[in-house]
Image (cartoon, rainbow, N blue to C red):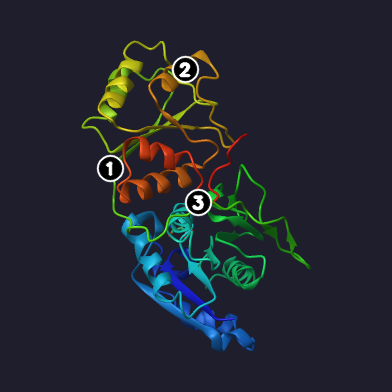
């Protein structure tokens, strides 16, 4: 088994500086020490992305840099490990899952809450767990290993800024948990994939949280000038304050301008059902697209992905409604 590691940045390889944590640890040396005496050690290659970043600085171009590195080693490696900051790791994992849906080789992202040089750091457990996951014959698609759990990459969300169990997949069970032995809970669902996808490019997407008392003027200001798409984070199954004067009119203007309106839920665990309540019916009538049970991270990355592929109008809506890489559950 040959493994390729892409080191993209994050706390795992950071050191203290007068201005706070920044990349600078000898990650390559440390990684070698983790593998000392293991047969796999001689079958590992590693790329260090330049510049190494705090993942809160990541953009779709950074997702693409990781994808390009993986594609460059797709012929020579059997599995991939990505060392990444935790802040936006779930976004990157989802982005990779769409772009690499057709690759057929496992990719595992991991990082840590503490840098590798700190006594009691979670770096070692996460990296060795991710390695074990990547090498397992159960491994499939793009995954995220963290805090003793292996999650489907496009189902994961960061749930804690400090806990060692910092990620969950709210709508589906984990793929595996560690222990002696590990317990595997079955493969994640797959999707339609998309052959030879175009690279990720930045898109102008407004992600808007609806809150009680929000005015139409505020909604209009947040969508002026019109973005390429709107992700509206609504209440419950997809409800908005439809009786607020002008609120639905502002959304109607967007729909008439062919700006896709994608309706997500603010609930940690959600299944969007447009039109289930009168308060969400206006969105259904406008032709808004429901996000099913996608996490915000999976939904945002998917929106960027589809726009980067040039998908627009009914084609965009069709792709948003179907699973590309197991990111959503389609109800019968
Ligand atoms: N800000 C860091 C990052 O995402 C946090 C971490 O890695 O835990 O790069």
User: Does residue 71 appear anywhere in the picture?
Assistant: yes
Residue 19 appearing in the image: no
Choose the circle earlier in sequence order: 2 or 3. Answer: 3
Above-or-below relation of 226 to 63: above
Residue at 31% x, 13% y: name it.
Answer: 246
Question: How far across and down, in percent of the image, does residue 182 sit?
Answer: 74, 65
Q: Nearer the viewer, mark 3 or mark 1?
A: 3
Q: Which mark is residue 192?
A: 3
- Depth check: give the residue in front, 325 or 136: 325
Residue 98 in which image quadrant: bottom left
Query: Label 2's element?
Result: helix
> Residue visible at 31% across and 50% down?
308
Please give the name of the residue rendered at 54% of the width and 70% of the height, measured from the top-left corner: 118
319 w.r.t. 84: above or below: above
Label 2 to label 3: alpha-carbon separation: 29 Å
Q: Which residue is mark 2?
A: 281
For the residues labelled 3 and 1, the Cα–Cα distance comes to 26 Å
Considering only order in the chain, which callout, 1 or 3, is on the residue closer to the N terminus?
Answer: 3
105 sits left or right of 314 in the view: right
Task: Quarter of the image for the N terminus: give it.
Answer: bottom right
Q: Nearer the viewer, mark 1 or mark 2?
A: 2
Mark 1 burial class by Cα count in 10 Å: few <14, some 14-19, many 20+ = few
Q: Residues within 10 Å of mark 3 (few under 14, many from 20)?
A: some
Q: Which residue is mark 1?
A: 204
Q: Could you tell me which secondary element the residue under label 3 belongs to?
A: loop
Which is more foreground, mark 2 or mark 3? 3
278 above or below 33? above
């Amino acid at each position: 088994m040959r493994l390729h590691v892409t080191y993209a940045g994050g706390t795992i390889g950071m050191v203290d500086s007068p201005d706070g944590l920044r990349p600078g640890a000898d990650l390559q040396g440390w990684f070698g020490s983790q593998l000392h005496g293991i047969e796999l050690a001689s079958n590992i290659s590693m790329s260090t992305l330049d510049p190494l970043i705090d993942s809160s600085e990541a953009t779709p171009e950074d997702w693409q840099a990781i994808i390009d590195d993986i594609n460059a080693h797709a012929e020579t490696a059997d599995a991939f490990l990505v060392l990444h900051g935790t802040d936006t790791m779930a976004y990157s994992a989802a982005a990779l899952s769409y772009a690499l849906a057709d690759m057929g080789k496992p990719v595992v992202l991991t990082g840590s809450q503490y840098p590798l040089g700190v006594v009691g750091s979670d770096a070692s457990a996460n990296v060795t767990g991710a390695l074990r996951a990547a090498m397992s014959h159960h491994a499939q698609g793009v995954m995220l290993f963290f805090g003793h759990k292996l999650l489907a990459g496009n189902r994961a969300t960061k749930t804690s800024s400090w806990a060692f169990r910092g990620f969950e997949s709210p709508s589906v069970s984990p793929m595996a948990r560690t222990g002696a032995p590990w317990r595997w809970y079955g493969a994640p669902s797959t999707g339609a994939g998309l052959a030879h996808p175009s690279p990720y490019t930045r898109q102008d997407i407004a992600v808007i949280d609806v809150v009680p008392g929000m005015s139409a003027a505020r909604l209009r200001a947040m969508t002026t000038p019109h973005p390429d798409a709107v992700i509206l984070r609504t209440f419950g199954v997809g409800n908005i304050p439809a009786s607020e004067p002008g609120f639905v009119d502002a959304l109607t203007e967007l729909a008439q301008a062919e700006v896709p309106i994608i309706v997500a839920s603010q609930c940690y665990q959600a299944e969007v059902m447009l039109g289930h309540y009168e308060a969400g019916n206006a969105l259904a009538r406008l032709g808004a697209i429901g996000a099913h049970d996608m996490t915000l991270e999976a939904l945002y990355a998917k929106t960027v992905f589809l726009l980067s592929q040039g998908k627009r109008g009914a084609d965009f809506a069709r792709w948003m409604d179907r699973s590309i890489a197991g990111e959503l559950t389609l109800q019968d």
